[in-house]
Amino acid sequence: MKALFLVNARSGPRRRHGIEALIRDTCGHLEHDIVACGQKEELDEIVARAERDGVDVVYAVGGDGTVHETAKRLIGRDVALGVVPAGSENGFARQLGLPMNLRASMQSCRGGRIVTIDTARVNGMPFLATMGVGFDAAIAEAFANAGTRGLRTYVRVGLREIRRFHAEEYEIEVDGARQTRRAFVVAVANAAHYGNNARIAPLASLQDGVLDVVVVDEVSIVQAAALLPRLFRGTIDKSRHVTIVQGKRIEIHRPSAGAAHLDGEPVSLPARLSVEIVPRSLRVLIPDTMERI
């Protein structure tokens, strides 16, 4: 197997060089190259060159942002996505069942097991795991600007934002069935995980051909705080404030354009959102022992 490891060049020279040394030590059985990538615009040519050179797996070495930017360029290609979870949240790596220890993560995939998964897109923009509007979009934007990462920052930002967030009214259509809801969060999930083991759609699968539409009703600050432990225990679907339905085509109409997120990365999107599943569109390297993703 021939592999290319894409390392986030902004992770700091000392940390990056440590990761590169670990890759060389752990993956000596592979024919591989390591490339430090500083700007996401560089990825187009890097991925195209990898395909021309007969690379089998392009590893995204970093967090969910690195994975998102790498993966969307591999959709529809024969080259598979590999993940080395070197970020702070690592939601997609957790969905794949990868250990959070870097060496163990790379060793878990020594068998070269590749499966094909679904991806999704909103208004033509691809995403892997989740997209959303409402409070989680506000959190994504605030978290991106927080300066530090990790679970502690996520919780601190969440507690701050919840005091000033206001629910909105959404018209939601899932495979032709329409409803109007005043919601705290509307999330569309191809995978269970946000990051840090927070699971917004606990039963979502990357290979079932459908998306999980999660609606969290308008809640008080106290009720919202009570949902947080459920998010990390994987039981948010049991709350009376949460509804989850599955579908292949979703239309979301909100009062105005504004904040949203794709795989945790903040973006600004129009008032009307068209979301659809893209079945069996991305090849992914997974741990040898993993069964359901």
Image (cartoon, rainbow, N blue to C red):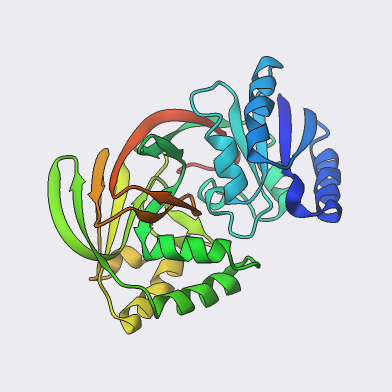
Q: Give percent across and percent down for residue 269.
A: 38, 48
Whether residue 87 appears in this view of the structure is yes
Identify whether 143 is placed above or below 56.
Answer: below
Would residue 117 be found to the left or right of residue 203 on screen? right
Locate residue 151: give its quadrant.
bottom right
Residue shown at 36%/53% (left/top)?
203
Q: Residue at x 35, y 38 (%)?
A: 123
Residue 187 or residue 143, whichever sits in front: 143
Q: Nearer the viewer, residue 279 or 40?
A: 40
Check the image and report above or below for 182 versus 248. Answer: below
Quarter-of-image position of residue 288: top right
Q: Residue at horizontal 64%, vertical 22%?
A: 48
x%, y% of residue 232? Answer: 46, 68
Quarter of the N terminus within the rendering: top right
Q: Which of these two is toward me, 18 or 167? A: 167
Is 50 on the left or on the right of 16, as rendered? Answer: left
